[in-house]
Image (tube, rainbow, N blue to C red):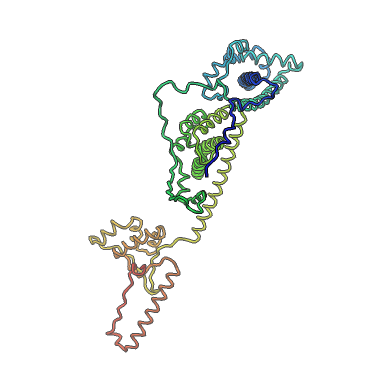
Amino acid sequence: MAIDYSKWDKLELSDDSDVEVHPNVDKKSFIKWKQRDIHEKRQQRNQELKSILVQLTMYAKLNERVDSLLEALTPSQISDDAAVTKFLDEKFDKHEKFDYDALLKTKGDTLRKGLKDLTFDPAEFETTPPYNEMVEDLFVQIKEDHADAKDALKLVNYAKEHRARIDDLLSKQSIKLDDLLYQKSLLISSDDYHTGFDRSFLNKDEEERTPETKTVTSVETINSPGVTNTPPKKAEKTEKEVLEELQVMPETTEFSKIPLGDYVKSGAYLVKHPWICTEQQKDALIMTAFDHQLAGDSKAARQVIHQSLLLQYIAQLCGGGPNYNKDATVKAIKLFIGKINDPSVPVRTGFLQDYENTFNHIQNRCELIKQEQSQASDDDGEEGEALIQLRALDEGTELSVDIPPEGTPEYQLFTTELPLEMQEAVKTKSLDEVNKVFAKYKIEDAEQILEIINQCGVIGVSGYIEDEHEFEELQKQYNEQQIQEVEEEADDNADADSSVVHTETPNTEDIVD
């Protein structure tokens, strides 16, 4: 059947089809108004970002100076303006004030992306006073606003109240900054365009690890009846595959050794090795924390937990899942490291709290594991292991312990093959001492020693047992054999003096077999 394409002839295309305006409004004018609105909002957003950046930087510097004053000076010294000025000038740079260019140089690597492309007019911060002068003005203002601030203790209390209000303002401004940066990241402007490279040679990145894929060959025939596109069933993972997934990559091991709290170094390493930012590597790494804690190394356990949580947060931020996306992962790394490296951002507080909770959980779990292992070992000790002990099968027979004569092959075997502890036990000529040494060895090692003893001929061994039940069975069989031999002798009416019953003493190895 021929297909009719004529219906597509009526389709009308327009370059501005995405712009819909009222018929009474000129489209070109509307587009210009829209562009102007976009530029105005962008300028307003950048202005707010600049204002918040100045506030956060300034308040952090002021808090640092106020904390130093409250810690180092007495209340009476704080009430003295000259003492405050002298302390600040000695401890801090008296000319230091907000400088965007200096901020880029000192914190350029850790500064968040949306704050690196701001444009400051030098006149905007040239008129701002130095931080030391701001602190001095703060105490002067407190004295002017509160008549009772002449009292040194009251002045200190008012300074602490002001310090608390600044902390609250920092928290609110940090939340607003996050929202503005998020809005900015959703839009693309001409400021976001930059030269990617201007040379013909590019440094090749390190080879990324790619998961092994299995190729499946399928045979398909034309016009096959009843063929439907059904997705193949996902094969269940074997125990070996599950264990392989929990293998820690060498790059992850190296990442776990980065000093705790050095977020700049951790971020730089993850940008070079983004493929380790997965839930699987987090699980594999945090399992090693259990090993460290069980071994009593809490410091190493804390280190591993901290780094594994970094992997977890970044993996969740970039969406995680089996589909690895390098660009999304690198973007998530830079975003999260930029936030957590800023002490004033609430994200860092939440991360550190999660870190402490995880360590406490692992610590408590390891204590339970140790208790379970200790209880299990006690139970095993009560049940006892199989031991080799030398005993005579006949109650009327005693085993003798003798050292082979010197100069014989048996003596050489005795001195060279037997453990020194067993040699000392044999020299005592006490069967109990020999059995005490046997009790210290596992069944496999004891069997080897027993074989050497048989070759040396130091003990007349009629049999050995591994437990009481086996001994009773062997003794019962031996007694029945003796009774049977006596009955056979009586039936034959043989002469007791000339008739000798030869009974072969069972060899130790025969009994084992």
Say which quarter of the image contains residue 250. Answer: top left
Instruction: For residue 296, say whether it is visible.
Output: no
Say which quarter of the image contains residue 394. Answer: bottom left
> Looking at the image, which is closer to me, 245 or 39?
39
Q: What residue is at 40 percent from the left and 29 percent from the top?
A: 204
Say which quarter of the image contains residue 50. Answer: top right
Q: What residue is at 54 percent from the left and 52 percent from the top?
A: 372
Residue 185 to residue 96: above or below: below
Q: Position of residue 25 (x, y in %)?
A: 69, 21
Q: Among all residues in the image, which is located at the extreme left?
A: 407
Q: Position of residue 457 (x, y in %)?
A: 29, 65
Q: Position of residue 9 (x, y in %)?
A: 57, 33
> Looking at the image, which is closer to me, 508 or 261?
261
Q: Position of residue 125 (x, y in %)?
A: 61, 13
Q: Quadrant of the C terminus?
A: bottom left
Q: Among all residues in the image, which is located at the extreme right?
A: 147
Instruction: For residue 311, say whether it is visible.
Output: yes
Residue 326 to residue 105: above or below: below
Q: What residue is at 61 percent from the left and 32 percent from the top?
A: 349
